[in-house]
Image (tube, rainbow, N blue to C red):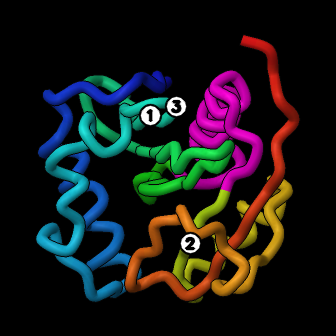
Amino acid sequence: MFEIIPFEEQYTDAICALILNIQQNEFQVTITLADQPDLLKISAVYQQNGGNFWVAVTEGEVIGTIALIDCGEGIGCIRKMFVRADWRGKGRGLAQQLFDTLEAWAGQHRIAALYLGTVERLHAAIRFYIRNGFEPVVAEALPASFPRMAVDTHFFGKGLIQQRP
């Protein structure tokens, strides 16, 4: 079993290791820790305003992450959604629970629309986002406040139903 908790500093090294391993070794994305300075200042970047960063842990090990940046004006940006290979798949449900946690939080914090960027080779991730109601968005149609990553080639968006706090 696993639990999903808001980011705590003690998990920084394990988060960096998980994300870099998936990016570099599984998907051969040419990206380093230096290209992602946000990973070394998670609280300052993600846990502001209506944003947050969640960590999935089991027996003290980090097995997944997802982050939300509050871009203002009701816009949220999903970042850093990663699940360790042995915890992927519908049978595990970890990716879905991470996403559901973020979506519920966003709805409670007046975020009306979510956007994300990804790379073409992440086919399973793209299918996951589409299954969860995201639609393709051309880069030129992204909100001005959306923080684009240089490696991202595909963009998606989804409107949310507002929940009362």
Q: Earlier in the sequence, mark 2 or mark 1?
A: 1
Give the spatial CA distance, label 3 vs label 1. Answer: 7 Å
Report which residue position mark 3 lands on: 50
Quarter of the image with the C terminus in it: top right
Report which residue position mark 2 lands on: 117
Residue drawn at the location 58% of the way across and 69% of the way down: 144
Against 32, residue 130 (above or below) is above
Indicate the secondary structure of the residue bearing disc 2: strand
Query: For the residue carrying disc 2, how many other residues have a C-alpha within 10 Å: few (<14), some (14-19), or many (20+)?
Result: many
Residue drawn at the location 87% of the way across and 35% of the way down: 161
Indicate the secondary structure of the residue bearing disc 1: strand
Which stretch is magenta? Answer: 88-114
Q: Inspect the image, locate mark 2, and give the three-letter code of the amino acid beneath it.
A: Gly
Of marks 3 and 1, the one in the foreground:
3
Of marks 3 and 2, the one in the foreground:
3
Give the spatial CA distance, label 3 vs label 2. Answer: 19 Å
In the image, taking residue 21 as reference, residue 34 lies left or right, namely: left
Q: Inspect the image, locate mark 3, and give the three-letter code of the amino acid beneath it.
A: Gly
